[in-house]
Image (spheres, rainbow, N blue to C red):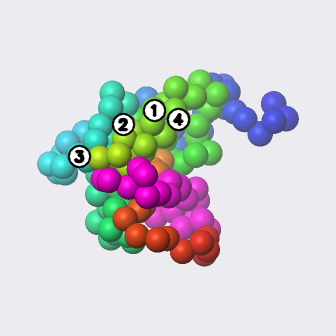
């Protein structure tokens, strides 16, 4: 395609139509551990990070397995929008919508991704440092 975007014919092995048995985020999204959800939508769930880096540190995860941002295709635009809308809802529920919050994702080991299921971090509740490393 030349524009760096993928279409539905460029599906990677890290993208599936359902949960992956050995993926902890797939299991959480399916309710296997009884993890409380901060918010949820038809296609995504949000839950607290086990190792918070800020007073508010919530993960927004699609119910369907995608390894990372690189696995989103053009046909996933509604899902991407839903994930970001859920991040905003998390910020509202956590009381950081007005004071400010950060939404970020890591894609690949060099970026710091440790769970290879697409997820967005919603961080807030205190002034956040400006650095990215």
Residue for point 59% across, 24% down: 75
In three-dimensional space, the C-alpha distance between marks 2 and 4, rounded to whole angstroms, equals 10 Å
Q: Is residue 110 left or right of residue 94?
A: right
| Circles 1 and 4: CB atoms closer than 8 Å | yes
Q: Residues within 10 Å of mark 2 (few under 14, many from 20)?
A: some
Residue for point 40% across, 70% down: 126
Looking at the image, tell me whether mark 2 or mark 1 is earlier in sequence order: 2
Looking at the image, tell me whether mark 3 or mark 4 is earlier in sequence order: 3
Residue 89: x, y in percent?
37, 41
Give the image quarter of residue 52: bottom left
Residue for point 43% across, 43% down: 88
The residue under label 2 is: 44
Which residues fall within the magenta stretch? 94-117
In three-dimensional space, the C-alpha distance between marks 3 and 1, rounded to whole angstroms, equals 16 Å
The residue under label 1 is: 82
Quadrant in which the C terminus is drawn: bottom right
Residue 39: x, y in percent?
28, 41
The residue under label 4 is: 80
| Circles 3 and 1: CB atoms closer than 8 Å | no
Residue closest to the eye, 104 or 114: 104
User: Is the residue 130 above or below the residue 60 in the image?
Assistant: below
The residue under label 3 is: 37
Q: Which of labels 2 and 1 is toward the front?
A: 1
């Amino acid at each position: 395609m030349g524009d760096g975007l993928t279409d539905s014919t460029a599906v990677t092995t890290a993208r599936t139509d359902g949960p992956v048995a050995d993926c902890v985020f797939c299991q959480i999204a399916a309710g296997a551990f009884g993890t409380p959800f901060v918010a949820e939508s038809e296609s995504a769930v949000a839950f607290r990070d086990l190792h918070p880096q800020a007073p508010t540190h919530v993960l927004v995860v699609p119910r369907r397995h995608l390894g990372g941002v690189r696995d989103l295709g053009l046909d996933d635009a509604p899902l991407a929008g839903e994930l970001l809308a859920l991040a905003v809802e998390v910020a509202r529920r956590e009381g950081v919508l007005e004071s400010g919050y950060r939404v970020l994702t890591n894609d690949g080991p060099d970026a710091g991704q440790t769970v290879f299921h697409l997820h967005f971090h919603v961080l807030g509740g205190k002034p956040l440092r400006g650095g990215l490393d």
